[in-house]
C-alpha cells in the first residue's frame, strides 16, 4: 500500500475514534443519567457472575475508568500530529512517528471498544440502549463496532510500516548495527 494511502486511512480512522471518545467524556465524567443507566445495567449484570462488590465497583467507577482509557487512547492517536510539528520545526526527520503511535493507539481503541461491543451483545444493555423511554437506535453500538474494526485496521495497516521505518527515525541502518 502506498505510504500516502496508508497515512490517509490511518488519520481518518484515528480522527473518527478521537471524535467519538472525546465527545463522550463529559457524559462519562459527569455521570450523566444515560451513563449511569449504561454502567449500572452492566454492573448489575456483572454482579451475577463476579459478585456484587465487582458489579457495584463497575457501576460506580466504570465510566471513569473507561473514559480515562479513551482519553489516553485519543492522546496516543493525536500525539503524531504534535510530534510532527515539533520535529519539523527542529529540522528533524518525521518518518515513522505516525505509524508507531497509530499502531499502539489502534490496539488500545480495539481493546476498549471490544469491551463495549461485548457488553452490548451479551449483557442486558442490548444493541439498542433504551433509557427513560428513549431508544438510541443502536448508535452507541454501531459507533463502538466501527471503532473496533477501525482500531484493528489501524493496528494492521501501521504495524508493518512502524517496524520498517524504525531505523530511519533513529538515523541507524542495518549495516551500522553489525
Image: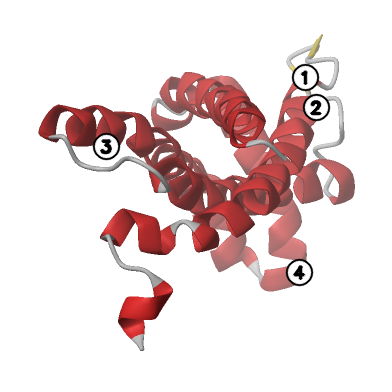
Per the image, the residue denoted by label 1 is 139
Q: Is residue 14 above or below residue 169?
A: above
Dots 2, 1 in contact, CB < 8 A? yes
Dots 3, 4 in contact, CB < 8 A? no
Viewer-side residue, 21 vs 122: 21
Kindly report the distance in space between the C-alpha atoms of the residues bearing marks 2 and 3.
Answer: 32 Å
Measured as percent of width and height from the top left, residue 109 is found at 59, 45
Per the image, the residue denoted by label 3 is 83
Q: Is residue 167 above or below residue 103?
A: below
Q: Is residue 134 above or below residue 55?
A: above
Per the image, the residue denoted by label 2 is 142
Q: Quadrant of the N terminus?
A: top right
Q: Nearer the viewer, mark 4 or mark 1?
A: 1
Question: Which numbered disc, 3 or 4, marks the residue that appears first in the sequence?
Answer: 4
Query: Badge 4: few (under 14), some or many (20 or more) residues near its Cα, within 10 Å?
Result: few
Of the numbered discs in the image, which one, if any, rests on residue 49? 4
| In the image: residue 55, left or right of residue 114 | left
Residue in view at x 57 percent, y 52 percent: 161
Query: Badge 2: few (under 14), some or many (20 or more) residues near its Cα, within 10 Å?
Result: some
Q: Secondary structure at mark 1?
A: helix
Measured as percent of width and height from the top left, residue 157 is found at 67, 46
Residue in view at x 40 percent, y 25 percent: 30
Measured as percent of width and height from the top left, residue 162 is found at 51, 55
| In the image: residue 143, left or right of residue 175 | right
Furthest residue toward top: 134
Amino acid at each position: 500500500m502506498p505510504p500516502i494511502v496508508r497515512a490517509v486511512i490511518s488519520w481518518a480512522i484515528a480522527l473518527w475514534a478521537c471524535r467519538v471518545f472525546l465527545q463522550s467524556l463529559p457524559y462519562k465524567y459527569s455521570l450523566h443519567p444515560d451513563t449511569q443507566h449504561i454502567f449500572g445495567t452492566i454492573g448489575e449484570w456483572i454482579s451475577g457472575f463476579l459478585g456484587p462488590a465487582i458489579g457495584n465497583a463497575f457501576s460506580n467507577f466504570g465510566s471513569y475508568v473507561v473514559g480515562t482509557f479513551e482519553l489516553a487512547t485519543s492522546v496516543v492517536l493525536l500525539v503524531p500530529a504534535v510530534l510532527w510539528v515539533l520535529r519539523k520545526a527542529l529540522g528533524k526527520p518525521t518518518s515513522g512517528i505516525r505509524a508507531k503511535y497509530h499502531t499502539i493507539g489502534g490496539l488500545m481503541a480495539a481493546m476498549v471498544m471490544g469491551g463495549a461491543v461485548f457488553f452490548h451483545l451479551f449483557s442486558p444493555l442490548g444493541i439498542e440502549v433504551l433509557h427513560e423511554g428513549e431508544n438510541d437506535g443502536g448508535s452507541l453500538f454501531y459507533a463502538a463496532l466501527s471503532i473496533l474494526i477501525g482500531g484493528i485496521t489501524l493496528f494492521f495497516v501501521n504495524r508493518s510500516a512502524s517496524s520498517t521505518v524504525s531505523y530511519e527515525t533513529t538515523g541507524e541502518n542495518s549495516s551500522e548495527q553489525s
